[in-house]
Image (tube, grey):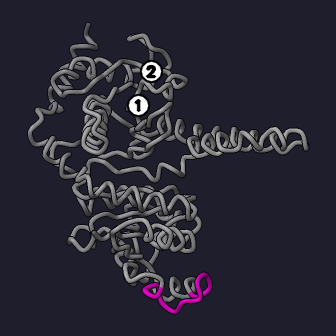
Amino acid sequence: MKILLDAMGGDNAPDANIKGAVKAIEQIDAEVILIGNKDIINSRIKELYGKDDISEISNRLSIHHTTETIEMVDIPTQAIKRKKDSSMVVGFNMLKQGEGDVFISAGNSGALLTGATLLIGRIKGIDRPALAGILPSYKSRLVLMDCGSNTNCKPINLLQFAQMATIYLRNTFGNEHPTVGLLNIGTEETKGNELTKESYHLLKEKAEELDINFVGNVEGRDAFNGKLDILVTDGFTGNVFLKAVEGLGKFVKRTLTESLKKNMLSKLAAIPALPAINRFKKTVDYKEYGGALFLGVKKPVVKAHGSSDEKLFEFTIKQAEQFVKNKTVDHMIEEFEKVKTVEKSDLINEANSTNLE
């Protein structure tokens, strides 16, 4: 297996990318190919590890040289079309041509999503691919979809997000009937805006046909109680929700740490509780769960957090290896070929009839 890593993408590139790859390579069976400017990468390897070439660290690490980088300020579509020798575009082309099995980038989100859709292509039957973020939940995990790729959605999109996330959990974690909730401001069927109300109707109507275990509307405060496996929403709301959760997690960890270090008495009292405290910190640390999977395209693509440090790159690389091993994309292609998915025309007719009632 070959994992393609955009070495130039992210706020902390290339150091965090390199360090994450070096740490991950000790824990995985795959090769990791760092895509980016060879001179820059090798100079950082010399500074960080005292080696002249990355292959001296591991024979499963290598560099694919590129001359351009897509910056965070670049306009996505223009960047993908014009920067042909950028680490991101080259990475997508290598993935498409079979020179790698999965592509990871922490770079420009819009460019990554545009490139994945244009260069890799959508799975037949899927209207819009979406980012599936994995978050901690009580004694479990929560898949948030969409967490940032589609800011404007239609009911068909939320329905297919539920389908894709269900297929992902079923084939990756063996959860045959993952529970699906629709993020809303209340649990009642009549709550929410037009998108959530129409999406609720479609999910309820098509749940049995599409084998979706839909449990209804879910308020944000109930998302992490361990009863929910998938939380469906549009990309704008999902991204706000995701970053609020990340921020809250940081606040809780920081406040807890400061409280325990406040004085000598609190420090002494914390000693017996350190194992439990460390387990708690690990549970709420979003870095432990890797990047967001871009579900709905024909090859495995993973979006790492833009501010990823070496730890998050390490976990994202390990996550990507499992993504490939479990053949998630292959299963999704098969499922959408055999599952009787809902046609757009059917949805339009249903939405119109709902509005007339």
**Quadrant, the N terminus:** bottom left
Would you say 295 lies left or right of 224 here? left
- Tell me: residue 83, above or below residue 215: below
**Which amino acid is tagged 1?**
Leu
Q: Position of residue 162 (x, y in %)?
A: 30, 33
- Asked whether disc 1 touches disc 2, contact meaning CB atoms under 8 Å apart, the reply is yes
Q: Which residues are magenta?
A: 46-56
Foreground residue, 277 or 181?
277
98 over 200 or under it: above or below: below
Q: Which residue is mark 1?
A: 231
Q: Is residue 28 magenta?
A: no
Q: Looking at this view, is 184 or 71 the one in front?
A: 184
* Callout 1: SS: strand
Where residue 35 sits in the image (x, y, percent)? 40, 76
Element type where label 2 sits in the image:
strand
Location of mark 2 (residue): 218
Mark 2: amino acid: Val
